[in-house]
Image: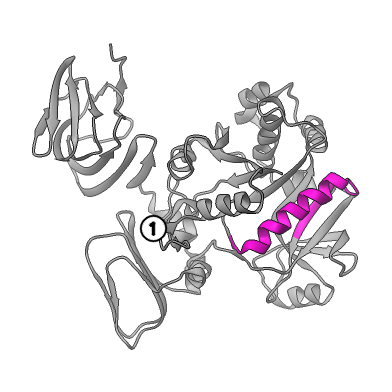
Amino acid sequence: MNVILLSGGSGKRLWPLSNNVRSKQFIKIFKNSNGEYESMLQRMYKGIKDADPAAKITIATSKSQISSIINQLGDNVQISKEPCRRDTFPAIALAAAFLHDVGNVKETEPVVICPVDPYVDSSYFKALSKLSDLAEENKANLTLLGMEPTYPSEKYGYIIPQNKNDVSKVECFKEKPDLNTAKEYISRGALWNGGIFAFKLGYLLQKCHELIDFSDYSDLFDKYETLEKISFDYAVVEKEPNIQVLRFNGSWKDLGTWNTLTEAMDENVQGNAILDTTCKNVHVVNELDAPVICMGLENVVISASVQGILVADKNQSSYMKPLVDSLKESVRFAEKSWGEYKVIDSTGESLTVKVTLRAGHKMNYHAHQNRSEIWNIVSGEGKVILDGAEQNVSAGDIVKIPVLCKHTIIAKSDLQILEVQLGKEISASDKIKYELN
């Protein structure tokens, strides 16, 4: 089974845990069978591999998410990198060309497309395998997985099948309806459209060449930034007359809001928090060291991270995106290939960052025009290079880096550093990179 997992978007409706770099699918919020926390990405990847150990999984994602994916899944994961974000059709087109030209997948092989972030049980992964088998039978150009609605939702688009059989031809698609229209759709056997579908690779490549002028994967990658931003539904699905749908009645939840996410959580509190006995249907996710105490609350979610603090009625939390957009904030936490950083204090002319550098990794050799830095080594051992001069450092050491001083640090073991940046213009773009001889 060939599977393309779509990992895009920032999940702003799960602020403050998610941002443009740390998207919702990377938040470790669910417990696995060993009692360890895992992310949506890890659950989805493991579920596919458990159902089909031979499955070939490719993750279609933007450059900013690659480090998080590798950190969570390992170096051997196959990734189709988008040079920039251009919506689902360009992303799927690029991934399809990647499979064919880089992965050597034949045009006759079926490919399954699905989002990386729904909350599902094992029956979902069996359905993906069935979806792949139906695509291989080639009785339709596209085979969709439609979810049996559990309530008349206004949040989803609907697939209207010709009948209520397990596999049916698709009559039409409907946009997100109002409540009464949703009820009418369901009475006709309509299914939620979760953006999950399968096809023969050759079919999609043909569609891609019809809509985009490119020769191969490398050419498409180079042209990617010029492609029209358009969804796969609009570009392909709604124009395809030969579509069938597989009915799915297993567990499936779109965890795009705090309201739906907390429904899937195993516990009411993650992190340092206390709920008194008068609290009802309250969930707290606290990534800060400071404690959170909740009293007399009902139907509320509280989330605290270095990015900010959210206190919201659960139902109202799904409407938070415009408020998050208005913040125009910088990213205060991110995973990188070398480790992670977390902003812990910010004033007008200083920024304090907690940096974790994994053993064997190093920073770029670089300098800053507008700021100096002070590195306080909290734990671990490493080697610092300042303008070509080397020195070993360990816990308790302090390194002062003047403006325009070329510098890097190489981790001999896992390193934790408190980095204090000082200057009137502190900016992530203030970096001059050099080659390290």
| Residue found at the far bottom of this picture | 278
Q: Quadrant of residue 334?
A: top left
User: At x 67% / y 72%, what residue is drawn?
Assistant: 153
User: At x 32% / y 14%, what residue is drawn?
Assistant: 435
Q: Which amino acid does label 1 sit on?
A: Pro
Seen in the image, is 190 located left or right of residue 228?
Answer: right
User: At x 34% / y 88%, what residue is drawn?
Assistant: 278
| Residue found at the far top of this picture | 437
Q: Which of 104 and 8 is in front in this view?
A: 104
Screen quadrant of the C terminus: top left
Q: How many marks?
A: 1
Q: Position of residue 405 (x, y in %)?
A: 18, 20
Seen in the image, is 350 located left or right of residue 435?
Answer: left
User: Does the rendering let one see residue 238?
Assistant: no
User: At x 49% / y 43%, what residue is drawn?
Assistant: 73
User: Does the rendering let one see residue 82?
Assistant: yes
Q: Which of 202 and 314 is in front in this view?
A: 202
Q: Which range of residues does the magenta coloring cover?
A: 119-145
Is residue 133 shown in magenta? yes
Q: Where is residue 434 in the image (x, y as percent from the top left)?
A: 30, 16
**Residue matched to label 1:** 16
User: Which SS class for mark 1?
Assistant: loop
* Above or below 330: residue 153: below
Q: Position of residue 17 (x, y in %)?
A: 40, 57
Screen quadrant of the N terminus: top right
Q: Which of 432 and 191 is in front in this view?
A: 191
